[in-house]
Amino acid sequence: MKRILIFTGIICMAAAVLLGGVVGGFFLNPRLITSVAFGVNTAPVELPLRVSFKDRAPDAKTSSIVSAADAFLGSLDTTQRDAATYSFSDNEQRSKWSNFPEGMIPRGGLRIGTLSEQQYVLMDTLIAEFMSEDGVRNIDYQLAAERTFPTDDPFGEYGVDKFYVAFLGEPSETQPWMFQFGGHHLGINITVYGADVTFSPMLTGGQPLDIDYEGKRVFIIQNEVDAAQAVLESLTDLQKADAVRGDTAINLLLGPGEYGTIVAPEGVKGSDLSLKQKNLLISLIQTRLGFINDNDNAAKMQTVMAELDDTYFGWWGPQDAPGFAYYRITAPSTVIEYAPQDTLAESPEQEHAHSMFRNPSNDYGAAWIGAK
C-alpha cells in the first residue's frame, strides 16, 4: 500500500508539471501537491508571538551556543547570511521541516551544499554545542543514509547538499531566537531564550536504517528498538492488556504540520509500573532525549522524572518483531512517537521509520514566546 501511495504521489507531481496555466500554478506548489497526494498537513505554524520579550539571564551553555552561532554567521557572505536568516516571527519558516525530501517539502534557509570547508566546520561546531555526542552521531547517520539516495531524482531532490540551516531572529544570550537544521527525515528545531532551550519539535528516524558508517554496519535506531522491546517484554500480562492498543502499526500523530495537536494518553500508566519497569521506560526516553546536550537534557529529564507516574506507554503492532511496531510515550510535557514505515510483508528488516519528540506545552518555545 505504501508503495502505491508513493507511486500515486509521483504521478500527481508529474501531472502537475504537465498541466500549466492557472490550474498548473496551483499544483506546481510542491507543498500543496504533497498535501493532496500523501494527506499530510503542510500549513504554516499558527503561533501568535508577544510584541516584545524581557531579557532572560543566560547560563554557560547558552553563552557557548551563541558564541558558536556568531562564529558561523560571521563566516557567511552577505548572500549566504540573507538566505540563512529570518525574522523571529516567521511562522511559515518555522513549519519548513519534514520527513519528505526537498522536492516535496521545500525548505528555507542556507543550503549546506553551498558552504565552504571552513564554514561547514563552523556549522558542525555549532551543532555540537546544541547536541550531545549521541545527537551528533545520529545526525551523521542520517546524512550517511541520505547519501544512498540518487541525487538526480526529478521529484525527490535527495542528497546531503539539500539539507539546510536557518536562524529565526539573531542569536542572543538574553532574547529568544531559533535554530533549524535538517532535510529528508531530519528536522532539528531549537528555540533558545536565555538559559532555557527547547528541542521541540524534533524529527529523526531515517531511511535506510541499515547503513555503512566508517567501515561498520550500523542500524541507526538499534538502541531505541532494543529499549522499546525491553519495556514491552518487562510487562505482565495484565499490564500488556493496557499497553497493547492494536495489532497493526499506525503512523505519526504529531508529525510535520501538527503544531497544536493534542493526543490522548493511551497504554499502561507509569504509576502502575514497578521500579525496574520505570527504569526501563526512562532508558527508552533517554534514547531519544539523549540527543540533546548534557546541560539541557538534564533540565528536561528533571521534568520527565517529575511526570513519570503520569506517563503512558502504548504499543500498536506485532509484539515479537522489534522495529515493526508503533509505540508512543505520552506525558504532560513529553510525547515521543516511533512509527515504522515497512511492514513484515514488505521487508524482513525495518528500513524506514519516522520518530518524533514534542513538548505539547512548549512546542517551539510557545510557553515562553507565545502571545497571552
Image (cartoon, rainbow, N blue to C red):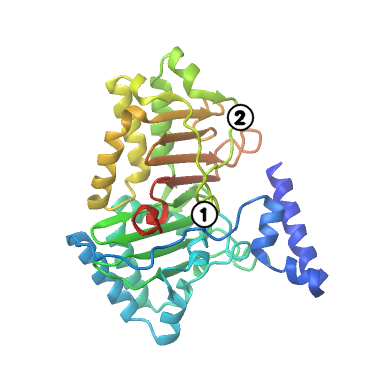
Residue 185, numbered circle: 1
Q: In this view, does 14 lie to the left or right of 54?
A: right
Q: Please report the residue visible at 24 percent of the width from the left and 50 percent of the height from the top.
A: 294
* In front of the other: 334 or 61: 334
Q: Please report the residue visible at 50 percent of the width from the left and 48 percent of the height from the top.
A: 260
Question: Disc 2 to disc 1, how far (Cα)?
Answer: 22 Å
Percent x, y of residue 284: 36, 35
Q: In this view, does 182 lie to the left or right of 196?
A: right
Q: Quick one: SS at disc 1?
A: loop
* In front of the other: 52 or 332: 52
Q: Residues within 10 Å of mark 2 (few under 14, many from 20)?
A: few
- Up the image or down, 344 lies above or below 148; here it is above
What amino acid type is highlighted by mark number 1? Answer: His
Percent x, y of residue 37: 71, 54
Percent x, y of residue 151: 59, 67
What amino acid type is highlighted by mark number 2? Answer: Thr
Q: Please report the residue visible at 60 percent of the width from the left and 57 percent of the height from the top.
A: 42
- The residue at the far left in this view is 60
Quadrant hosting residue 157: bottom right
Q: Is residue 125 left or right of residue 225?
A: left
Question: Badge 2 is on which residue?
Answer: 248
Q: How crowded is mark 1: few (under 14 residues within 10 Å), some or many (20 or more)?
A: many
State whether residue 220 appears in this view: no
The C terminus, quarter of image = bottom left
Along the polypeptide, which appears first: circle 2 or circle 1?
1
